[in-house]
Amino acid sequence: MLALGRLLELTLAGREPTEKIQLLGEHVRLHWLDEGVLEVSLVGAQDCGLDLVLSAGIHGNETAPIELLDELLQAIARGDLQPRARLLVVFGNPEAMRRGERFVEQDLNRLFAGRHAEQVGFEAMRANDLEHHLSNFFSRPGRQRLHYDLHTAIRGSKIEQFALQPYAVGRSPCPQQLARLAQAGIAAVLLQDKPGITFSAFSYAHLQAEAFTLELGRARPFGRNQQVDLQALRQSLWQLIEGRETPVDPAALERLQLFRVSRELIKHSDAFRLHLPDTVENFSELAQGSLLAEDIAGSRWLVEEAQARIIFPNPRVANGLRAGLLVVPTTLDAWPG
């Protein structure tokens, strides 16, 4: 197998390949651009017109999607997976991956869309570099642009596999893209209603790509992801890479649960208290009228919404960051964009 097909092995070892460009057969080129960043393209042959970014490891301890991308790359290197899409594979935070930690100094997935310019440190520099790599990759006119940023969650979830749709002024969620996610095993999508600073939000709002953050189960160490069923997603990605995707079934959209953000919980001080058990799962329902959280100066969050659910509850985030999201069911017809 070509060395560049073992991108994960190179990344975890902290090694830079001697040969940064390798040819696979007559038409497939592997190009190592940076630590954990590999471009797969066709030379001397026509591709299908899709520029596809698959990223994982933005949080270093979220290993199931890292292993999935490694599996796909090794299949390409063996010749089992024949790419007809132009592909960029990104392992986002190599140092955090080597340490088995979510991040080293700062949460990398809160440093995009220019936020890195306000910070210093390793992750801020990495966010800047990744923005440049994606900007270059998505610079060709007249092509389809798609970015899936793959994650697993800190905690369990009532809905195990779900996606987050970023927001951009003047754009609305694409029903065909949502239906494709449903066919790939995604059971729910959270439609966001304001600009974000995540990796997928950068691609969506700044590079005009279709982009989603995919949450694929619970975070576990390398080699312990047998309980995470990614077969439907694996098949969908394989077909996208080979340019032979089956037609999207509009009926798949009807199976998809849609949510919108009702409110963000922002932790303002060390006095912040979240009145939920540490074991609470994502998408847990909240009783209307209950006390959800308290913070400095007597500030309180009451659950005012009917059918409200909590996702990403994390009272241990740094002050000023999001400690959770209240979400409620919605429909595409109700989308304000």
Image (cartoon, rainbow, N blue to C red):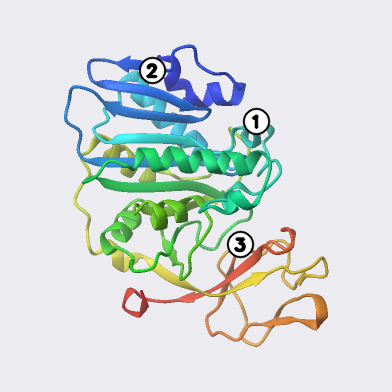
Q: Nearer the viewer, mark 3 or mark 2?
A: 2
Amino acid type indicated by mark 3 = Phe
| Residue 313 x/y as whole percent | 65, 64
Give the Cα distance between marks 3 and 2: 40 Å
Q: Quadrant of the N terminus?
A: top left
Crowding near the residue tagged with mark 2, few <14, some 14–19, many ≥20 C-alpha atoms within 10 Å: some
For disc 1, the marked residue is 98
For disc 2, the marked residue is 21
> Which is nearer the N-term, disc 3 or disc 1?
1
Residue 118 circle label: none
For disc 3, the marked residue is 312
The answer to which quarter of the image holds residue 331 is bottom left
> Which is nearer the N-term, disc 1 or disc 2?
2
Give the Cα distance between marks 3 and 1: 24 Å
Q: Is residue 121 visible?
A: yes
- Single out the residue that lies furthest toward the top: 18
Please name the residue shown 54% across and 63% down the image.
Answer: 158
Task: Label 2, secondary structure: give it.
Answer: strand
State the residue in front, 232 or 60: 60
From the viewer's perspective, is 58 left or right of 135?
A: right
Q: Nearer the viewer, mark 1 or mark 2?
A: 2
Amino acid type indicated by mark 2 = Ile
Q: Is residue 30 above or below residue 315?
A: above
Please name the residue shown 34% across and 25% down the image.
Answer: 76
Task: Report if the CB atoms under discs 3 and 2 are less than 8 Å apart.
Answer: no
